Amino acid sequence: QVQLVESGGGLVQAGGSLRLSCAASGRTFGAYAMGWFRQAPGKEREFVAAINWSGANTYYADSVKGRFTISRDNAKKTLYLQMNTLKPEDTAVYYCATRRGAYSGTSSRADEYDYWGQGTQVTVSS
């Protein structure tokens, strides 16, 4: 059974930064692409960023490109999301997920991810 546990969320002022972490267990972490998604109240879940199994390739939603950075440490079995220049519209619950299929590339499609964390709340005040 795969477990993903997010941490690092919180309340921050607009323009500030946060670093989210996602600790994984139960699967060979380094063999799977990972992604971050978010869901704001009353809105559908949306893609934020993805990284392939090795960390060599990344992919971002246009809304966060240039402000967010996804990375991974396969030795520590941990995924990260560095979020800079945060905006009120970034307020959401952030989820990490692991992509179905070993050694796959990045994807923005939620249905291609099979395990999800419980989420961590990020609130950006104006």
Image: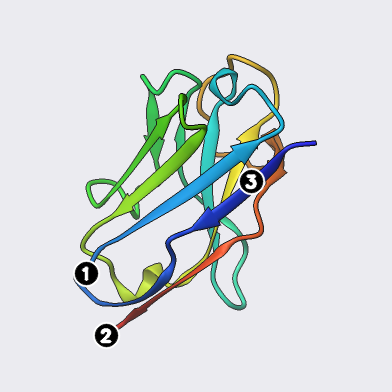
Tell me the residue that label 1 is attached to.
16
Above or below, 41 relative to 35: below
Residue 96 rendering spot, x and y as whole percentages? 56, 47
Residue 108 rendering spot, x and y as whole percentages? 54, 39
Tell me the residue that label 3 is attached to.
4
Say what secondary structure mark 2 lies in.
loop
Quarter of the image where the N terminus is located: top right
Q: In front: 90, or 34?
A: 34
Q: Quadrant of residue 16?
A: bottom left
Q: Quadrant of residue 3?
A: top right
Tell me if 36 is positioned left or right of 3 in this view.
left
Count neighbours of disc 2 (C-alpha within 10 A) and say few if under 14, some if 14 to 19, many if 20 or more. Answer: few
Quarter of the image where the C terminus is located: bottom left
Above or below, 25 relative to 125: above
Residue drawn at x 48%, y 24% is 52
Q: In front: 75, or 66?
A: 75
Q: Earlier in the sequence, mark 1 or mark 3?
A: 3
Say what secondary structure mark 3 lies in.
strand
Count neighbours of disc 3 (C-alpha within 10 A) and say few if under 14, some if 14 to 19, many if 20 or more. Answer: many
Q: Tell which tag, 1 or 3, sits nearer the viewer.
A: 3
Residue 75 rendering spot, x and y as whole percentages? 46, 24
Residue drawn at x 65%, y 43% is 110
The amino acid type, in three-letter code, at marker 2 is: Ser
Residue 32 is tagged as none
Q: In front: 4, or 47?
A: 4
Residue 126 is tagged as 2
The amino acid type, in three-letter code, at marker 3 is: Leu
Distance CA(mark 1)–CA(mark 3): 26 Å
Q: Earlier in the sequence, mark 2 or mark 1?
A: 1
Count neighbours of disc 1 (C-alpha within 10 A) and say few if under 14, some if 14 to 19, many if 20 or more. Answer: some
